[in-house]
Every structure is written in structure tokens, then in C-alpha cells.
Amino acid sequence: MTQQSAFHFKTITPDLIHDALIEVGLYPDSGIIELNSYENRVYQFLDEQHKRYVVKFYRPTRWNRTQIQEEPDFMLSLYEAGLSVIAPLFFAGQTVLEYRGFLYAVFPSVGGLQYETDNLLQLEEVGRLIGRIHQIGYQHHFSTRPTIGIDEYLITPRNILANTSLLPGKLKQNFLFVLDELIVEVKKRWSQPHSYLRLQGDCHPGNILWRDGPFIVDFDDARNGPAVQDLWMLLNGERREQRIQLEILLEAYTEYTHFDNEQLALIEPLRAMRMIHYLSWIVRRWEDPAFPRAFPWMIEYDFWRKQQLLFSEQINALNEQPLQPGLIY
């Protein structure tokens, strides 16, 4: 495979996409529409039979081919078990394809409604689906994809943030002081779970479609980790509301898979890890022209000052009692 720069997505032209698809026997009969995706490049098209597809070109240098392959393999195991995920298509026995040094995959395009975050009946169904996904996720671990941990989500991001020119010099010392304090507090509360599994990894409401039931999409961040990682991002609102949501979510989830309630103490550490990792992710991708266009506020002083305040608030959240499920009447 030809090594590509992480920022050579500009070489993915409509002609390249068209030629890649024709090579595997798909003949686009419509314009190729770019969909909203930053980490990879994702496009939708109709073929000559008026079937709708999505093609995803993976960002070069992020994952190696073996790590990429573990994503469709996991999705296919879920799909074959009858679960509502969008599995990639096979071409000549392969789900991960290559064209001019780019790795890509093709999926059927499945439309749906937006998941309603305030709909408790939908939340219940999502809980059942995640429970079934985890039932399969526990069967074995990813062998080459990473496990959620301190180095990837705290230490490396901290070094990236300390060295970025986007962080205003006048704010840098205080910002890093608060960031380091947050990292210390997370480390106190983080311990590698005794049991972990293959996760969707980024199970937020935007990755759920509703079609007479939930469909979970985008397993690009799939990795090993604690089960609660696929649950906590579904909670929203005031703490009282989250307790109710958690009760409903876990009651549905445990119809299929055991849940260790001790993992609830990981919710706020995981939230802090996501905050830090996400911020450093944007910084790492800043040379990609799509990122300055999508995140123009990253060059503003007030943005970084607000992040510092959010880190301080998260330290306070870590010192609260862990969230517990409970219906309140």
C-alpha cells in the first residue's frame, strides 16, 4: 500500500471516487455528495439501478489495515446476529478495499429519523440494542485496536495541547495548570476495569438513527473499554433526569447483558477524558483544511478561556457522588 499523508484528502477527487467504484463494479448514476464527516471522507451516491450507497475513505495513517479491518468484522458479526447496524458490503470477498493508496469501504445507505433524546421509550429500545451489541462484544477483544486508557486520552492529548500555537500564550500557564489538576483527579479515579469488551466507542445520540427502532451507525472509533462508555453519552439534562434515564437504560440493557454498577463511578472520568481528547483531536487535525473551516473559534482567546472554566467545573463534577439509577415519583 502506498503511504499517504494524513492531509492528502484533497487528492480524493470526484474522478478518483468514480474510478474506485467502477473498479468494484458500482456505476454511479448521480452526483457524488460529500456527507458531514471530519475524520474520514464519506460520500453518498446512487448507482445505475437507483440503489443508494455510502462510500467511506479512511484517513491515512490513523489506523493500519488490520485495525481498520476489525471495524467491519465487528459490524458484520452484529449484523449476522440480526442487530440493527449498517454492515459494509463485500466485493471479491473483501470489505476493506484499496484504490491509489486509499483504503475505503462501501455501505448501503439507510435513511432514518433523528433519535429523540427526550423520548424515554426510544431510550429503552436503545438500551436493549446496546445490551445485545455488548453481548457479542464480550465474546472476545479487539486484537489490534487500542483499549481506552490514560495515555491515549490524557497524557498524549496534554502534550499536544501544551505545544499547540492555537493556545494563547497569555492563557497557557493557567490553562495547563487547570488541565494538569483535572488529569490528576481523573487518574485517582481511573482503574482498568476487570472486564472490558469491544465497544462502539462513540455512542452519542448523533450516531443513532430511528427506523421503527434504533440503528447504531459509525463504528470508526470502536475499541476495547468498559461497558459504561457506550451508555453515559445517552444521558442528558439535570441530575434528577439522568437518574431516571439511567434506570430505564440499565433495566433494558440488562435484559441481555450483565452490567457492573461499579462502572458508574467511571462516568465523570470518561467525560473528562473525552473533553481533553476531543480538544487535542481538533488540534492534531488542524493542518487538514476542513478543520479550520469547521472550528474557526479555535483561534479565539475566549474559546480557550471557556475550556479552562469547563475543566474546572469537571473537577468539581469528579468530586460529586457517582450517578446512580433511580426512578423518582
Image (cartoon, rainbow, N blue to C red):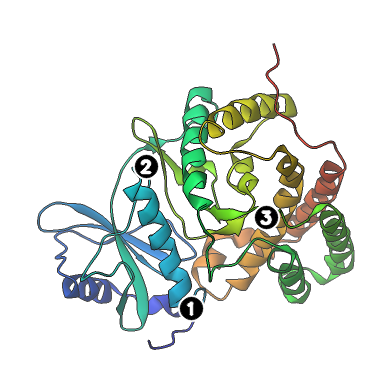
Query: Closest to the observer: 208 or 169?
Result: 208
Secondary element at image label 1: loop
Q: Position of residue 56 (x, y in %)?
A: 36, 64
Label 1 and label 3: CA atoms lie apart by: 24 Å
Pointer 3 local density, CA inside 10 Å: few below 14, some 14–19, many at least 20: some
Q: Nearer the viewer, mark 1 or mark 3?
A: 3
Quadrant assignment, res 236: top right
Q: Quadrant of the C terminus?
A: top right
Q: Quadrant of the N terminus?
A: bottom left
Secondary element at image label 3: helix
- Circle 1: residue type: Phe
Left of 217 or right of it: where is 193?
Answer: right
The earlier-in-sequence mark between 1 and 3 is 1
Is the C-beta separation of discs 2 and 3 under 8 Å?
no
Q: Which mark is residue 84?
A: 2
Q: Is residue 198 above or below residue 216?
A: below
Location of mark 1 (residue): 7
Label 2 and label 3: CA atoms lie apart by: 26 Å
Label 1 and label 2: CA atoms lie apart by: 33 Å
Q: Position of residue 320 (x, y in %)?
A: 85, 38
Residue at 10 percent across and 58 percent down: it is: 48
- Circle 2: residue type: Ser
Left of 23 or right of it: where is 190?
Answer: right
Is the C-beta separation of discs 1 and 2 under 8 Å?
no
Q: Position of residue 202 (x, y in %)?
A: 55, 52
Q: Which mark is residue 274?
A: 3
Query: Closest to the observer: 54 or 306?
Result: 54
The earlier-in-sequence mark between 1 and 2 is 1
Q: Nearer the viewer, mark 1 or mark 2?
A: 2
